[in-house]
Amino acid sequence: MSTPDSYRFFENRSCEYYPCHRGIEEINCLFCFCPLYQMENCPGNPWYKEINGKNVKVCSDCVFPHRPENYELIMKILSR
């Protein structure tokens, strides 16, 4: 992806984990570790798994932070 707003998008195709998600053409690696993980009601699509009596958030099927068009919303959420 080449854009004048390149600070909003970073893609690392040489990463050993790339692509970390299937089904999307462009993966924004800027938020590789999702900054919304701690949010109980994040805008992504996580699911929860019980491990040792605790509910653990599982985001392996979520591509929300990796979609370039979600940059602005993520920044807005983080600025609250």
Image (tube, rainbow, N blue to C red):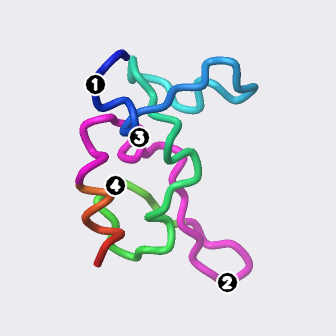
Left or right: residue 49 versus residue 6 is: right
The magenta segment is 49-72
Furthest toward the bottom, the residue is 53
- According to the picture, the residue beneath numbered tag 4 turns out to be 44
Q: Amino acid at mark 3?
A: Val
Q: Assess disc 4: are there few (<14), some (14-19) or many (≥20) residues with their C-alpha within 10 Å of its C-alpha.
A: some
Query: How much space separates mark 3 and mark 1, taking CA atoms?
Result: 23 Å
Position of residue 78 relative to residue 46, above or below, is below
**Label 4 vs 2, first from the N-terminus:** 4
Three-letter code, disc 1: Pro
| 13 or 48, nearer to the observer | 13
Is the C-beta separation of discs 4 and 1 under 8 Å? no
Q: Secondary structure at mark 1?
A: loop
Q: Quadrant of residue 44?
A: bottom left
Give the quadrant of residue 69.
top left
How far apart are labels 4 and 1 at the CA level? 26 Å
Marks 4 and 3 in Cβ contact (< 8 Å): yes
Marks 3 and 2 sit apart, C-alpha to C-alpha, by 27 Å
State which tag comes first along the sequence, 3 or 2.
Answer: 2
